[in-house]
Image (spheres, rainbow, N blue to C red):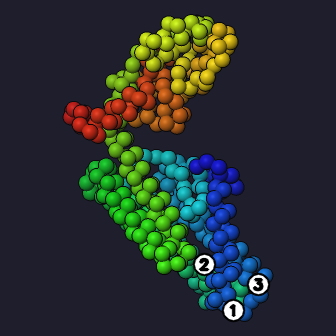
Amino acid sequence: MHRATKLFRIFGIDVKLHYTWWFVFIFIAWSLASSFFPHYFPEYTTTEYWIMGIVASALLFVSVLLHELAHSLVAKAKNIKVDSITLFFFGGVASISKEDMKPSSEFFMAIAGPLFSIFLGGVFYVLHILDINGMWTAITFYLYQLNFILAAFNLVPGYPLDGGRALRAILYAYYKDITKATRIAAGLGKLFAGFLIVLGLVSLFSGIGTGLWFVLLGGFLYFIANISYQQVVIKSILDKITVQELSTKPTIVSPTLKFVDFMKKYGNSGKTTFIVKGKSFSGVLDINRIQRISPKMKDLVTVQQLSVSLHKIKTVSLKDTAYTAFKLITTQNIEILPVMHKKSLVSVITRQSLTNRLMWETKFHTIRKRKA
Ligand SMILES: [Zn+2]
């Protein structure tokens, strides 16, 4: 997630704060100080309400962080890498980078968060009824309810919510088909997202300000449900294809070739993929990446100067799956990915060829059934 600042590192996991978090933090503190606390606990001063609001808002985010840590620690126990936890607008998100997860691992990882929220809710409830200090009793009154709500909301069985992830794990174990399991779980997730949007719109029109919040949250969940399903479909298709099948022989040009001569030679050739290869340089020339060049510069600049050196790109080999290539192309944001064989640049695979292949498969199911 972009525009997030690192706060600290715990159990080997970076905890980050996305800039949108500040809006929510202030909004929650303000609404607690101006309406929630004065309504339930009328005996305090404005300053005290603000102190309570800020402390409660901060502890709410500590609760969210602990919820995400619970997911992350179960993941780590299952040998799944956790990169970071980011707190943002809608709460928290743990970035867990493994796709081929065992159903049991995904299940336990998913329910760990809500279970921990229920536990936290219990702790705050006990602190609330102990009634040690008036202000603290008010703060814990809010926190125990919010942790229970957080648990209940996350247990809704629609992907990408935790309940939806647990459901997907169960369906995956049952059908042995991740695409089908994700389709059902994400379908329920979209249904729930639609329900939140309708609920939000209804309350907006009846003049309740929080309606907008539900609309945004519903939209966000719908978007993630959709994209998660697409990802699974893309993976299921491209995992069956090797890089070799989709790679193309690019046109090889010499590093010392002047750009003006390169244009004369290939400008009308219809060729689109070029690699630059000489004794001491190998790289990729991506025409889409080249900025406008002044006529003067065209005479001076060589193709080597306009290309990206192989050292700067994570490459694939012929035997890798097309999905590996797809991920490298998306994460590096490039159009042409070099394909290596025995430490030498042999061909390239393009974003276009992957997109075309996906289009053919999703429309016409062109992949022949292979022997297992
Ligand atoms: Zn969760």
User: Disc 2 residue type?
Assistant: Leu
How far apart, in angstroms, are the residues tagged by discs 3 and 2?
Answer: 20 Å
Residue that badge 2 annotates: 143
| Circles 3 and 2: CB atoms closer than 8 Å | no
Q: Quadrant of residue 166?
A: bottom left
| SS for dot 2 | helix
User: Disc 1 residue type?
Assistant: Pro
- Please name the residue shown 49% across and 69% down the image: 214
| SS for dot 1 | loop
Residue that badge 1 annotates: 42
Left or right: 96 as drawn, with respect to 129: left
Residue that badge 3 annotates: 46
Q: Quadrant of residue 268?
A: top left
Left or right: 195 as drawn, with respect to 211: left
- Please name the residue shown 68% across and 81% down the image: 34
| Circles 2 and 1: CB atoms closer than 8 Å | no
- Please name the residue shown 56% across and 75% down the image: 209
